[in-house]
Each structure stands twice: as structure tokens, then as C-alpha cells.
Image (spheres, rainbow, N blue to C red):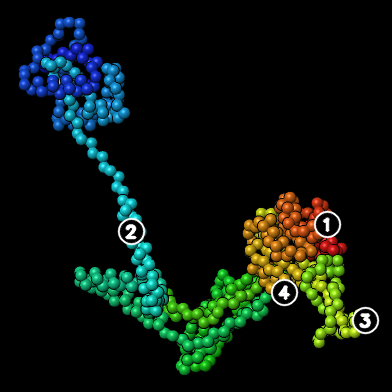
Amino acid sequence: MSDPVGPDEESATIRRSDLHAGASDAEATAARGARESRSRPPAPSGPVDGDESTVSRSSLKVRPAQKQPSRQRSSGATATGGSRWRSILGLRQPEDDTQAVHRNEPQASVGSSRSTRRRPELPTITLPRVQIPSAITQTGARILDLTGDRIRPLAEKAEPVWRPVSRALAWVSPLGWTVFGLGLVAWFLASRYEWTELAMIAVACLVLFLACVALAIGHSKVEIRTDVDPTRVTVGEPATGRIEVRNLSGRGMLPLLVELPVGRSAARFTLPSLGSGKSHEELFVVPTERRGVIQVGPATTVHGDPLGLVRRTMEWTEQSELFVHPLTTSLESLGAGLLRDLEGEVTPDLSMSDLAFHALREYQPGDDRRYIHWRSSAKHGRLLVRQFLDTRRSHLALVVDTSPEVYTGEDAAVELAISCAASLAVRSILDEQDTTIICNDQRISRSTAPLTLDTFARASIGQMDIFGATGDAAALAPDASIAILVTGSHRPFIQVQRALAQFEVEVIKVALVIDPDAQVGVRRGAGLTILTVRELADVRRVLFSGVLA
């Protein structure tokens, strides 16, 4: 839009041909016209002879920005219109329409007698983005590394000094630090503004804090014993513990609080006052509803105030473990022990009593006279005894799949699978067979029945790679004669087949499937024996016919 022009307003003529000049010519002409307009009177208004079109000067006149602040602010809104006129006049459109149109574009170009005025613009200030130089950050990192390397040895040397201080500071609870800080702030404000009420609050907080610290400083000379009997139980069996506290000091002892962690909970006992040399005993029950390992202890005494501002604990016993074994069922002999010993492969280990005869050697003091070969001894004129080679014993490799998603019933079904595997392992050990167990993150080979059940108690439920676990079992038991994989009904059969295929061809491969919705039975196919059970008692039924022989 153009400013209104009065009747006395001057006019200037501009030829249309001049408007098609280049951007550089227009700028030079505009500057020259501005200088000439200040040194001569304005040209009279009126039309100019010729075919050239006329443009009134009022359409090009712009008032100073100081007198028209509203027009100056709205200049950005007319950038689109300026761009359209530049395209009509044949001038090149710059990339930044908003800035280039108002700063570089002349309003009109005239001859030597023409005068123009450029629209004044306020400077645009762009604040750069604040960035921390990389040299500063790198220098800071280097300083931290150097100071850390130098401070660490000093801290280790001064540990006897600052370690007790840090432990003493740890006695104070967050509530205690709050009361102490409130007392200091109230004391400062009371001394500055002479406020009596704040002084009373400060004294009360500080006295209370110091009294609680004094209650926690006391040291008790006691002896604490904890016992859990038995240390190995089956799920559901009762397990009780006993804690005994004896006063070893030469004077009486005030009531004392004793804490004993039992699994995820803690048993708390408030002991009565004990005289010198007296003792007090408490009993507690350990929950055994779930399979696992229950940590008992350490027993700690708690010194502090009833409000909980300061709390100091001292440990008196070591941590002990209570093993809760999975449920098992008694099974008949697996039927694969003696038969495997008779027909199995011999080992290079020499023995004086076995089934595979190796050679004759000269008698040595201490040899069993039952193995003297009298006919050969008479022929050679000296005593000769038989020497044997150890034959390979039956070896059971047992892998338990603990992935909950492959079972119907998830965690409960996994516990059933662990119970079935534990029953097979115990029966194998009772048959004097070597046994290798892999159950998730736990593994054991050629061990006793209690330690094997401890391994099942430690096993956790979670995702498991049965192919890798079965490969580990094959590596731990290269002489395995039976390989059993306990898994769920949702595990694809091809995965079970591929996993058991890592054992040797002559190994008996069995898949024990836990499926509460299927019929109990035995199937054979693709080189595998598939046993399907719904509950723990079904394992005895499927093994009664000696399917593992």
C-alpha cells in the first residue's frame, strides 16, 4: 500500500524501460538519485510527453521508520508481495525473501534527474548458539582422570581414618539428618533475628539428636549362635531355627533388639534384660512352601533410639543356607545299568577287578590271591595274576528345560518338570550310575544325591537355550548311555530332536514331556522315546516297563 498524497505533493516520472534494468544498475541509479534530490528542487508534477508510462512518486515514497513504527513491524508481512513484483519486473529472486527484498531491492530506477528513497531497515541481530569448546571438555576429562589417579592412592592410604567416620555418619537416618539440619537453621535464624521461639526449637532438636546419638554409641558384649535344623528339607517339610544370645559382659544388659534375616523377610526378637553370663533362646520357623535356597543370617544387634533417628547395627554371625529340595517320587531301577556294563565299551584304565580281561602280569605283594592264574603260573614257574580293563558304566545325562512359555501352567509346570528330573537323578545315583545334570544356570556331574538335589534347589526359572544346554551335557558326559530332555508340550518336536541328536548314535535318547491335558503313555519315533506325564506319580508308571533299558 502507498501513503496518501496531498494536492501539493510532487510527482516524478519513471520510464518503463528503466524498470527492466538489472539489479546492479538499479542500485547505482537509486544512490545517485538520492544525492541529487538533496541538492536541487523537486521536479514539477505532471505527465511527461511520450509513449512512456508514468508512475506517481507517492507510490514510491516511504516515510521514515521512526515516524511509522507500525509499518516497520509489518514489513515482514509484505515480503511475499515484494517477491511477486520482483518476478514481474524480471529481477532475480534471492533465496531469502524476507531480508533481501527490503535491504537490497531499490524502489525504482530513474535517470540522472531521478531521485529515489530506500526504505530504512532496523538491523537484524542473530544470537549464535552457545557451545562449549571441545578443548575445554577434553581438558576437564583429563583433569578428572589425573586427579582420580592421584586421589585414589591417597584415599586407600587414608582409609583407616575416613572409613570409621563414614560408618559413623551412616548411623544417622534421613529423619535424623532432617532434625539436625532443622536445629541448625533454627539456631542461625534465632541468633540473627533474636527470635526466642526459634531458639527453643533449635535447642529441642539438637538435644534430641545428641541424646539419640548417645543411645547408639553403647557397645554390647554378647555371643549369638544360630542353628537351623535340618539344613536340607523337601518342599512342605517343617524347618525350625534357634537363636541363642549370651551376655559376656561383667554387668547387666538392657533390653536389646536382634534381627535375623530369613530369606526375603527378617525375624526380630526383643531380648529381655540379661545379667552377666546369662543367656536367652528364641525359636523361629523357616517357610518352606517353595523350592529354593533360603539365606539365614547374619544375626545383627540394633542400637538406637525408639524414634529411629540413629540406628547402629553390628553383625555377630555368618550367613547360612537352608536348601529346600523339590518333591521327588520313588522309582524302580532304570534297568540300564548292569546291561550297559556288560556290553559297553572298555576304557584304557587298568583294574584288578572288573569284567574285561586284559593280560597276565607277575604277582606283586598285596595283590588279591583270587586272581592268581595257577595254570600259567605253573607253566612259567612264577606267580602270575590277571589284569582287567574297566568297562564303561552307565551314565545318565539329564537336561531340564526351564522356559515357562513351553509349558501349560508355566511356573507350576516348570516345578513339576524339575521334580520329575530330580526323581530320575536320585534313582540313577542309587543305581550307582554316573549322572550329569543341567538345569538352566546350574550343572553338576558325577556327584552324590544330596549335592545333586542342592543343584536342583539352586536352579532358577527362566529362558533357556536347550540346544546349547544339551550340547554342554554331551560335552560333560561324552560316555553317556542315556540322554533325557525334560520339556513342555509347547516345545516344537524338531527342536527336541535336533537337541538330542548331539549325543552319539548308540545313546538312548528320551524326551520326557510335561502335558497336563494329554494322555499318559510311551511313544517311539524318529529315534526318540517320548514319555508323556501329567503329574509326578506318572513317571513311575511310564518307567515300570523298563523303557530305558
Amino acid type of the residue tagged 4 in the rendering? Thr
Residue at the location (31% across, 76% down)?
206
Q: Calculate the distance from the C-alpha at mark 2 to the C-alpha at mark 3.
A: 93 Å
**Residue 80 lies in quadrant:** top left
Amino acid type of the residue tagged 1 in the rendering? Val
Which secondary structure lies at badge 2?
helix
Relative to residue 511, is residue 25 depicted above or below?
above
Tag of residue 522: 1
Q: Calculate the distance from the C-alpha at mark 1 to the C-alpha at mark 2.
A: 71 Å
Q: Nearer the viewer, mark 4 or mark 3?
A: 3
Q: Nearer the viewer, mark 1 or mark 2?
A: 2
- First reached walking from the N terminus: tag 2 or tag 3: 2
Where is mark 2, residue-wise? 140
Q: Residues within 10 Å of mark 3 (few under 14, many from 20)?
A: few
Q: Calculate the distance from the C-alpha at mark 4 to the C-alpha at mark 3.
A: 47 Å
Amino acid type of the residue tagged 3 in the rendering? Lys
Tag of residue 379: 3
Can residue 457 be seen here? Answer: yes
